[in-house]
Image (cartoon, grey):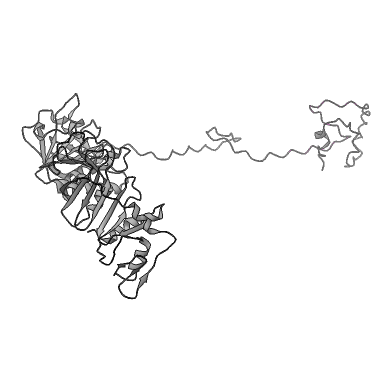
Amino acid sequence: MIDLKSVMKLASQPHSVPLMRAIVFDGRNAIALGNSRDPQPWWAGVPHAQPDLKAPVAVPVDAVTKHFLRSRHLKITPDHLHNGAGLRTDWDRKVDWNDALSLLPQPPEGEPIMFDLELDALDRVLIAVGEGDIRPALNAVLLDLTTGRIAGCDGHRLHLYDRRAPKLQPKKGQGALHVLVPKAAAKWLLYSADKTASVTVWKLGSKQPLVMMRTSDGLIYTSAVVGEFPDYMRIVRPRSSYLRWAKVAPIQFAESVKSMAKLNAVDKPKLQSVAVQWAEGRVYAGSGPNYVAIDCKVEATPGAWHAPAEQLFGYFMPRYLEDVADCVTPAADWCIPGPSEGKPVNQQPLGVFDGDFSALVMPQRETQPPTDKTPPEKPAKGPKPAPKPTPAPTSAPVPGKGPEKPVKGPKPTLKPTPAPTSAPVPAKGPEKPVKGPKPAPKPTPAPTSAPVPASRPGKAPKVDPFQPIRRILRGDPKK
């Protein structure tokens, strides 16, 4: 049921303009702007009588919320709220909230068009309306006053109701007689406790008509969405043109699809599609190549098939079929057309007919018929086997060849040079000898009988300043 709290919820949404967070009390209604996140402006209101109020007053929603936290009795005055006794609630005066009165819609002059609309029919059509589509017309409900139909479409499915709007003939100079009502506004009115809503349309036939829908407990006022609705009658076929149809228990079907979605959620993958094998009368649900037959039968009309049984199948989005099942009765006909324009049966849209209601669901592009035979599972990939250990060497160890490179360890220390038995002889290196004084003659080796004292070599000869420094830093091997 719609009440003042519903309007307060709309006004409490974040707005960049402070005036948008106000509720206007005009003595009979409480009205608030309802499109904080919707590009299409619309207003919503509920009856709220204030006999003592002589002129409209805009009150910030924060003040109304603060007042209700202390009392459930609300009396409006131009400058404060009270409960009819001693309780008083004031609001911030930094903003002139009465400027919000200029934002209220004013019904235009001229004779409007008025008719009643069943909220149940609006609900069944609204479920197929798109949300956030780049085409604005697909985010609205179509009231087609030329054909007397209401329709909703998101580009993948279409819900249609016949004889729910009046049929009118366009006058001279008028355009298309249709109104596109924003989805958010129409959805808000569905919470009403009434069964019908009174619809008033101004400027019908213009580029952007104005529409008001009112119930006993709520109302919405909005300008129509600007855009071209798809030519839905081009793809809708009459019921008599279908030669193949079946019966489905809608409640059982919808519950089975919901159960499969919950079951698949346990195993992480989402329920991707529902497949119907028309000739076998079975319904499958699953994802990828794995499908499971669900507890729902399809009773096909005998003698209505003119195509091979293995070709009579179709894959559909689970949510679309579930929504259709929620909108029809067991008497509905679930129909598929025959091959046309070179397309097989599994690429043809599904048509559902239930009295004045009809739906069209586009199929998914699958070419293989469904089956409950699970394909053989591929062996799971495990870790690579560990390399075989290298046998212990019988002699000197030989490093084994493998993909891994041997870990580099610390460089081995150099073996100390044995002490010379005579004067040390400089080791020959790659460097060229530095020119200098001729070396002294080699000393005569001492006799083997006399002991040789272990003494350090004498001072090194003078080094040429152009000698490489790496030779100077070479340490004494005896240290």
Identify the residue at horizontal 59%, vertical 36% (top origin): 397
Q: Is residue 364 above or below residue 70?
A: above
Q: Quadrant of the N terminus?
A: bottom left
Name the spot of residue 417 as percent of width and height, x first: 79, 37
Q: Quadrant of residue 454?
A: top right
Identify the residue at horizontal 22%, vertical 55% (top origin): 191
The span shown in magenta is 414-435
Q: Is residue 374 above or below residue 192?
A: above
Does the magenta-highlighted stretch encompass residue 300?
A: no
Identify which residue, 185 or 207, lies in the foreground. Answer: 207
Identify which residue, 71 or 241, lies in the foreground. Answer: 71
Q: Quadrant of residue 165?
A: top left
Residue 129 visible? The answer is no
Q: Residue furthest left?
A: 303
Name the spot of residue 443 as percent of width and height, x first: 93, 31
Name the spot of residue 410 as percent of width and height, x first: 66, 41
Q: Residue furthest top?
A: 342
Identify which residue, 321 or 61, lies in the foreground. Answer: 61
Q: How many marks?
A: 0
Residue 61 visible? The answer is yes
Name the spot of residue 209 as percent of width and height, x first: 25, 42
Does the magenta-highlighted stretch encompass residue 431?
A: yes
Task: Name the chief secondary structure element in magenta.
Answer: loop
- Is 373 positioned to the left or the right of 96 in the image? left
- Is 96 positioned to the left or the right of 252 in the image? right
Q: Quadrant of the C terminus?
A: top right
